[in-house]
Image (spheres, rainbow, N blue to C red):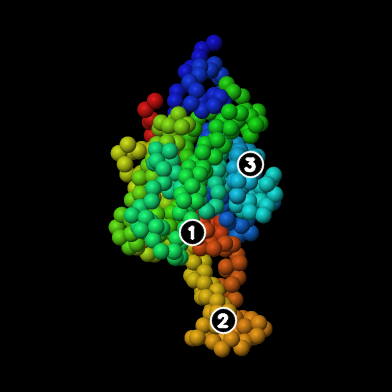
Amino acid sequence: MKTKRVITGGLMTAAAAGLMLVIPSQAGAKPLKVFILAGQSNMEGPASIKTFNYIGDDPVTAPLLETMRGADGKPTVCDGVWISYLTGADEKNFEITGKLTAGYGSMWGMDSRKPGDKIGPEFTFGLTMDAALVEPVLLLKAAWGGKSLHTDFRPPSAGPYQLNDYQKKLYYGPPGHGVPKDIDQWLANKQRETGHYYRLMLEHVRKALADPNRVVPGYAAAQGYELAGFVWLQGWNDMVDGHTYPAHGKPGRFALYSEWLAHFIRDVRRDLNAPKLRFVIGVMGVGGTNADKDTVEFRKAMAAPASLPEFKGNVAAVETAPFWSQELGAIDKKREQVSQMRWFLDAQHKDHANADGKMTQEQKEEFMRKFEAGLISPAEAALWKRGASNAGYHYLGCAKTFALMGRAFAETNLEMMKEPRSR
């Protein structure tokens, strides 16, 4: 029987990633295509399945909805795509596995043993891959809310987290807002937290690849597998961190993010022994295309590694701002005004109706009902309920947005797969 050598970054057996093995070729056996999806809450996926109908309202995206649901109106269950999803909170991590369908999004408050009621980009990413590839597909997803690249996902080659000059001056100065009460304890915690989720992510990948049959029934070791792509969707915690990135409003404010993300790509490739692993960077797009200066700077920093010569042809950045729902975003701004007015009433702000603090709870509720009705029309309220299910930093929990992102990530990965790669 002829044999073929497994090539680093190409086909591998189900043994732990990184081992160079010789396996027998098997006519007709198709290697498993493995894609890693990692990041924070938007990779988890906050979009409620209840917002699927909104996708069909747009003639441009209505065909996409048809791929996401069957004739019975229920979410599609992929025949050729499986998923292993690691998530959780406060060290209570859990894995859910199965054929890909809707429900492998955010698991907050859900049963950890089965899919829930939300999606992230994984659903249409998998649907797109299922339609494009003849090989079986395995998605390895690892995502946790509220995690940074500078600390939680910090790659090993970035070194330890270091205080910058701004932090040193602030943290070792007088007590104040945002200043650690115990700087020694803060530094100890920071050292413990640095890279923790990077390591968890790799452990998850290695565990799944050590025994793909645990997730993909019928998988045979002789098939081998290929690490075919990695999708990164993260950024909010870094973008709003004014201490790690203190130069507000200045060009290059987030240059360190670019540096650390490049380290991340190199380290993942090294640690999984896949030196040409394709990377798709989902560029933070909350708020849409009309972004403030700092948001624009952060987006540039996220996309920057894709322009490095060393990553040419196998790292790509996908802008997600175009997938933001402008009409839902406009309603969200009005909802923010409603929330702000409620705060003014409760705080007895001098420029608002309850300045003297004499309004009863019933009077405040009546005031708010009238205020909201004058600001948000019934049609807007109905549209919001149809299309949104979460806050702005979660892309409004809009399934249309996440469906478009997932498809774009997959199409970009597939485009890179057409390019010849050095072995």
Q: Position of residue 231 (x, y in %)?
A: 47, 43
**Relative depth, front residue between 162 and 69:** 162
Going from the N terminus, do you reach mark 3 or mark 1 first? 3
C-alpha distance separating marks 3 and 1: 36 Å
C-alpha distance separating marks 2 and 3: 44 Å
Relative side of 327 to 83, left or right: left
Q: Nearer the viewer, mark 2 or mark 3?
A: 2
The residue lying at 61 percent from left, 88 percent from top is 358
Residue underneath mark 3: 95
Please tell me whether mark 1 sits on a helix, a strand or a loop.
loop
Please tell me whether mark 2 sits on a helix, a strand or a loop.
helix
Q: Position of residue 25 (x, y in %)?
A: 53, 18
Q: Nearer the viewer, mark 3 or mark 1?
A: 1
Residue underneath mark 1: 181
**Relative depth, front residue between 349 and 167:** 167
Q: Is residue 295 in view from this perspective?
A: no
Compared to 402, does 272 lie above or below? above
Q: Residues within 10 Å of mark 1 (few under 14, many from 20)?
A: few
